Amino acid sequence: MAKFITIGYGDRAGYDRTDSAVREAAHAHDERLRADGALMGVAGSPVQVRNHDGEGVRATHGPFMQSDLPVAGFAVIEAADIEEATRLVSETPCAVAHGVVEVWPLDSTP
């Protein structure tokens, strides 16, 4: 099985305007993914880390990337391929509550 990193983007407004039954089904879906071994978490406040040329660490609070929606959470899932990974995350809260989920293949390092 291949591993994939997923990044969920969504905001409270989109979540709140989604029917509560749809939200509850999405949370139940996340519970099933966790029970199957997915590592999931809600996004906290990020820190950017730089150590250019190994000359000293510089840490800056705040995100590096910008998007229309805030990052809501991350997951590491296993799936046979990108199509299965896409199917697995298509019913998560960010996907159904007017947000978006990115799926990134996690390739091995050389």
Image (tube, rainbow, N blue to C red):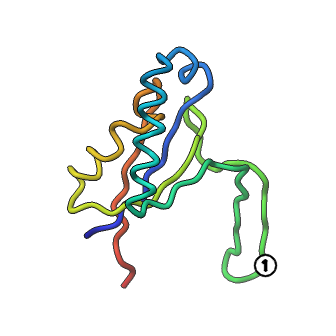
Identify which amino acid the numbered label 1 is placed on.
Gly
Looking at the image, is 36 positioned above or below residue 6?
A: below
Please name the residue shown 40% across and 52% down the image: 33
Number of dots carrying numbers: 1
Please name the residue shown 64% across and 50% down the image: 64
Please name the residue shown 58% across and 53% down the image: 41
Residue 82: x %, y % from top left: 24, 54
Q: Quadrant of residue 2?
A: bottom left
Give the residue pinned by disc 1. 56
Helix, strand or loop under label 1: loop
Residue 62 located left or right of residue 89: right
Q: Quadrant of residue 58?
A: bottom right
For the C terminus, which image quadrant? bottom left
Looking at the image, is 25 positioned above or below residue 61?
A: above
Badge 1 density bin: few <14, some 14–19, many ≥20, Cα 10 Å: few
Please name the residue shown 46% across and 24% down the image: 98
Looking at the image, is 18 positioned above or below residue 25?
A: above
For the N terminus, which image quadrant? bottom left
Residue 55 located left or right of residue 94: right
Residue 92: x %, y % from top left: 42, 38
Residue 16 located left or right of residue 47: left
Residue 9: x %, y % from top left: 52, 37
In this view, the residue in front, 42 or 33, is 33
Residue 23: x %, y % from top left: 48, 27
In this view, the residue in front, 51 or 63, is 63
Residue 53 located left or right of residue 40: right
